[in-house]
Image: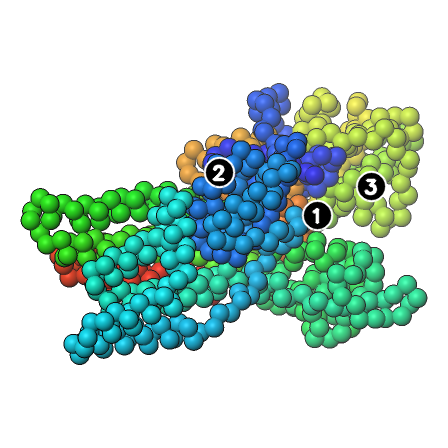
Amino acid sequence: MSYRPVKTTHADHACGHDDSAGHDHAHDHHHDSHAHGHSHSHGQECCAGQPLQTPTSNPNSMAAASIPAGHTLTRLRIAQMDCPTEEALIRKKLGGMTTVRGLEFNLMQRVLTVVHRNDALSAIEAAIRDLGMTTEPMAIAAKAVPREPVGKPWWPLALAGVAALGAEIVHWLALPEWLAALLALAAIVISGTGTYQKGWIALRHGNLNINALMSIAVTGAVLLRQWPEAAMVMVLFTIAELIEAKSLDRARNAIRSLVQLAPERAMVQLADGQWADVPVKAVAIGQSVRVKPGERIALDGVVTVGRSSVNQAPITGESLPVEKSVGDSVFAGTINESGSFEYQVTAESTHSTLARIIHAVEEAQGARAPTQRFVDQFAKVYTPVVFAFALAVALVPPLVLGGGWHDWIYRALVLLVIACPCALVISTPVTIVSGLAAAARHGILIKGGVYLEEGHKLAWLAFDKTGTITHGKPALTDTALLDTPAGVDAIRIATSLAARSDHPVSHAITVAGRGNGTLPLEVTDFAAIPGRGVRGTVGGVLYQLGNHRLIHELGVCSPTLETRLGELEEQGKTVILLTDGEHVLVLFAVADTIKDSSRAAIQALHELGIKTVMLTGDNAHTARAIAAQVHIDEALGDQLPEDKLRAVEGYARSGRVGMVGDGINDAPALARADIGFAMGAAGTDTAIETADVALMDDDLNKIARFVRLSRITRTVLVQNIATALGIKAVFLVLTLLGLGTMWMAVFADMGASLLVVANGLRLVRQ
């Protein structure tokens, strides 16, 4: 398990991961950790204290939190749990149980996560059954993939509709009242039994949900002998509920298309060398799989035989196929365009890149965005207030003003119909889920609704350099022997030290040495010097290979060398030097290349009004040179991890800050930023598990797409809330004026729900 420091700027940024354990901070994975260049303020203190760390990949997920001794985490699928109506009932029921430690609801996937005492599961299931709901325990690792709902027969509802229409006709023709009453009651019984059952359960548990309110309203209409209207209201409500459920299923199943990308079977080589078609769940890591042209790839792996072009759009969002040959990675759910090849499986079906993406989106669906939290709190106040107001409308005018009881009670019943904030409550999760699914289709993995919603507020975006703005594959450009003692092969020693590191700069020196036929020497006592370089003993002498900062700290930098380094750095080159502690033996200069997408990405961000800054461990000259080429607004060089953290904190004072990085040493800044963007490299575990947002194909242009999607999402949220409240306000006024009827209120309430759902679903096509 790896950890990531807690976000400190937002209540929802609870925690994340960091793969810092066990890595060389100078050379491993962080592409700026050489910190090439120098600063004359080396004695800077690190940030006071260490950030709190917690083992969870989703800051909003209780499933990843620590479970107390004697307790168990159980996930229950509850088919009847569709909206906050059911959540409120369950929360109130289970919240009073001393054996329940915590609850987490994922309404879009109908999954309840409970932390409870080991012996309490049966009592919990019994309590939920008492609410008229059924439970289905799920394995902890099981995905909350939505199932196709079991279809109900349509004819009872159609029959109820005919009966309600018959009651209307009987009333219109002035036929005997008992006939209208009979038809109306038949319609109510056929279509409204479920509503009455759920309404009674809600009232019994002290909850005023839509079922309770509708039951009261229809019963009141029956008592007022409004037979046709009572029947039509119940039938219309049931039809609207059915339509709404279908619409919600569309949002709920937005991720199902991803689930269906990977085939269920694969052609696998068995132990005896024969090839057989077997279920993917039975394929083990290390087995060979054969893929034909046009087939979907079933599992993650590495190509071992053949070559082809693969459409990776389902994973990375790339529009063009990617050439694959021996040694290249392939991903489950992608499409083999041409050619046949074999690959060795590197991950089981439940742990493939696709599976991790699906799981991440599902986790994100369960996390409440700020607007959703506001709406949920508002709904808790809104419904009782409207109910109390309806009660006052029924009692005050007749008692105080001498109004007719029949008219004012009827108006109160109409108010009850519009008292439930269904449209308001469902508008946010539908919109957020649609946005998350749209982003996933484009290779943008967003780890929570909070990040999607808050993305429109970004004022600054900070970038790491190497591997983010540049390719991270520098090449050696200059080599110069300096103060080298006789008999010392400085270049060979430097190459030997560089070979022990996987840092891109070190790799450039290693590659050049191999090209020249340089054989490495034995290195002992090898160690990383965080932010500066590495050291090791060769031939009994301690050597250090590092950046300009290291040379200064060791006190071996001369004015002549300073001038020479300045010239190279002015050219945008990164310098690394070898020293024995007394002399600087050899100088290497490397240069990186800028990604083609970087300039366009920065321009797109500027067009969106977002300012940019580059934070790099490279020297200030290199930083400015690279920044100028891609038109980044500001550039800070000589940045150690704690310096990047302080820089992000500084920019945060002038607005929301995003941080884009790909290395371990970027973790503190990524954690401090309001939104952390990781270069996903098409399936990097660290990126998928730790980032707020992962760019699956490392394309910086997708940050602008993310911001635009966030702004569209925000607009849709505002539209939906305004629509829901506006329609209710109109009908509130109409009802008080005596112009509103119950069936009109049903149309208004359910119509608003359908409008906001349809509006939210527009995001899926973005």
Instruction: Name the kind of residue labelled 1 in the image.
Output: Pro
Q: Residue at x 15, y 57 (%)?
A: 406
Q: In terms of sequence position, does the residue under pointer 1 or pointer 2 come before the other?
A: 2
Quadrant where the image shows the N terminus: top right
- Look at the image and tell me whether residue 730 can be seen: no
Pick the front one: 614 or 281: 281
Q: How many dots with numbers?
A: 3
- Give the labeled residue for mark 2: 95
Between 500 and 427, the residue placed more toward the observer is 427
Please tell me which residue is depicted at 81% across the width and 44% down the height of the picture: 510
* Identity of the residue furthest to the left in this view: 402
Under circle 2, the secondary element is helix
Return the residue nearer the eye: 733 or 271: 733
Query: Of the residues tagged 1 and 3, which is closer to the observer?
Result: 3
Task: Quadrant for residue 240, please give it.
Answer: bottom left
Whole-percent x, y for residue 624 in the image:
55, 41
Query: Crowding at label 1, few (<14), some or many (≥20) Cα neighbours within 10 Å?
Result: many
Mark 1 to mark 3: distance in Å? Answer: 15 Å
Label 1, on which residue?
474
Point out the tag, 3 or 2, that comes first from the N-terminus. Answer: 2
Say if mark 1 contacts mark 3, CB within 8 Å. no
Three-letter amino acid code of the residue under disc 2? Gly
Q: CA distance from mark 3 to mark 2?
A: 58 Å
Contact, mark 1 vs mark 2 (Cβ under 8 Å) = no
Q: Element under label 1?
A: loop
